[in-house]
Structure formats: structure tokens, C-alpha cells
Image (cartoon, rainbow, N blue to C red):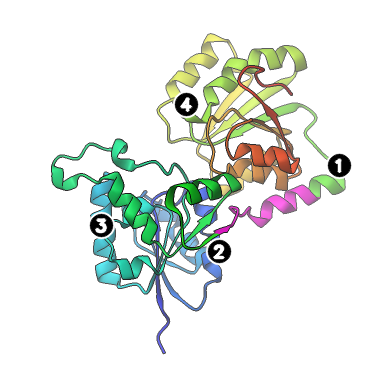
Amino acid sequence: MAKPKLLIIAPCFGIGGPSNALYFIKYLNDYTKTLFPANPILRASLINVEKALNTKIIVFNCKVNNYVMQALVRHVVDVYKPDYIISLAPELLSLQNRRLLERTLVIPQGFLEPIIIRFKPLTMKALITYPEIYLVSRSVGAYAAISKYMYKRIVDVFKPKRIALIYNPVMEQYFQLGEERIQRLSHPSKLRLLYVGRLERLKGVHKLIEWFPSVLRDFGDVSLHVVGSGGSLLNYLRHMIRRQDLSNRIFIHGFVDGSRLLEIYQHSNILVTASYWESFCLPVAEAAASAMPSVVREAFALKEHIELGYAIGFSEDSGMRL
């Protein structure tokens, strides 16, 4: 008897939390699985990804707007004819039939507001209205929320039939690093702050650089290591660093692979983020697993990390304090 077909729609695959949110599919051995990412994946990593997730991957190497991506998803569905779907983006499901939607699990990773504001369609035919998205989302069989904050938002916006709270998982290597730190009671001798995330204003990374001189005055021998890419803020951040003469204190590493990121965690003391909005924030969970505290803005899902006791919060008025 043939295994049922499972299609995984992952428009953010390859970016932190969204990739981790799908880690569980490696254990779904009773299904024939295919992953369709909207963002490009480095071809060199395809074999590793396919092996790790035990999943076939359909490569897509160019950026398109949401309407075109919906059409591509519809085409993949028509060709692959899945029995079930797991999707990280409900807005890409508006062209699917109701029967298949009822066998779909959605794991939203970000904003639940209508995506109409994210692109400019060329014709009225391309116009995706909020009522359409709302009706599609109400037809989805089940939702998984990656935080209590997202759970409440999904319930408020979509009134789902079924929903479960399933936090994004952290890879085992971070727990191993945490165990080593606890057993050896070892931390870097110098204060090394770490930021991991996209380089954009929503993430507040520019505020970390703005506040860094006051941290430097308080602690003396301190450095800030910024890991991430994908934003238009890079040149501005470099300008801020040069203007404040902090090139020997603040280091932008850009995108790094998993082994290099783990090494940077190993040589850091405190994870910091001034993000204005988070649906979960995987780096804070990774830091906690690594036996490393975090200092975070008291905002949205970040409050849950504070409540769990492994992060310290600050407000915009008080600024970051260590």
C-alpha cells in the first residue's frame, strides 16, 4: 500500500525559526514528503537538508510576489497531488480546494495581518482581498501556534477548528553546549554580547549599536557580535559603527552556517535583542539551551521568555541594561 503524500509549503525555509518549526517532519516516516520552499536554498546544502529531514525538496531560485507564489503552489499541488499539506503561510493557500484545506496544518511564523499591503498587483485579477484570506484561513483543518502570543492571535483572528501550542524546537547541539558550560562552569573571560537575527529595523539591531557606548562605559572590556543578513540596514549599521569609532568593539559577521553559529554562541556571554516584534524568537531559546542568559525588549512573544526565567526584559524608556 502506497504511503500518503505530504506536501510542506515553506516560504521562509532556511531562516532560523521557520526551518526549526519543520524539524519534526523528519519523524513522519509513514508519509512520502516533499518540501516546496519559496526562498532559494543553496544547492550545496540540498543533500544535507534532504538527508536531515528525510524529505524531497523542490528547488525554487527566484523571488516573486505572493500572488505568483500562490499560482506556483497551486501548480505543485496539481502535479504532486498531495493527500495532506503542512504550510507556514496561510496566505499561499487561497487557490486550494476546500477538501484539501481541511487536511492542512498551518504553522504561522509571523504577522497574521492581510498580505494585501505587501505587494502591488498589476491587475485586479491579482488582487487578494482580506475576506478571501480570512475565509481560506477559517477552512484550514488545524493550526499549530509557536508561542502563547501566537496562539491568542490565531484564535482571535481565525477562530480555528483545532489548534495546539507547539514551541519551535532547539537543536540538540545547543543543549550539549549548555551541559558543557554547566559542568565546567566555563564562560568567556571577556564580556561578549551576541545578536542573532535579520538586519532590519523591526529587529531593533540599530538600537543595540546606539546604546552600546553606555554599555562600554559601564563594563569596559566588552564587544558586540552581530550575526545575520537579509536586511537593507547593513550599510547604515556599518556607518553607525564607524561614526562612533567602534570598529574594534562591534563586529558584523553576516550569515554563518550552523557549526559556525554554534561556535559563536560558545564564545559569547549574553544574547541581546531590541526587537520590536517577535512571534517566538528562536535565538533566545537557543541561548537558554546553551546556558546563556538573554536581555530582551519586553514585547509580544519575548515576554514569554522573561516569564520562563531565562531572559531579562527592558522597556524602550529604560534602554538596555545588563
Residue 24: which numbered mark, if any? 2
For disc 1, the marked residue is 185
Q: Amino acid at mark 2?
A: Phe
Helix, strand or loop at label 1? It is: loop
Q: Where residue 278 sits: x, y (%)?
A: 54, 38
Helix, strand or loop at label 3? It is: helix
Q: Where residue 179 sits: x, y (%)?
A: 79, 51
In the image, residue 158 lies in the stretch drawn in magenta = no
Q: Residue at x 74, y 53 (%)?
A: 176
For disc 4, the marked residue is 201
In the image, the segment drawn in magenta is 164-179
Distance between mark 1 and mark 2 Cα atoms: 32 Å
Of badges 4 and 1, the one in the foreground is: 4
> Is residue 134 visible to the viewer in this orientation of the structure?
yes
Q: Which quadrant would the N terminus be assigned to in this image?
A: bottom left
Q: Earlier in the sequence, mark 4 or mark 2?
A: 2
Distance between mark 4 and mark 2 Cα atoms: 31 Å
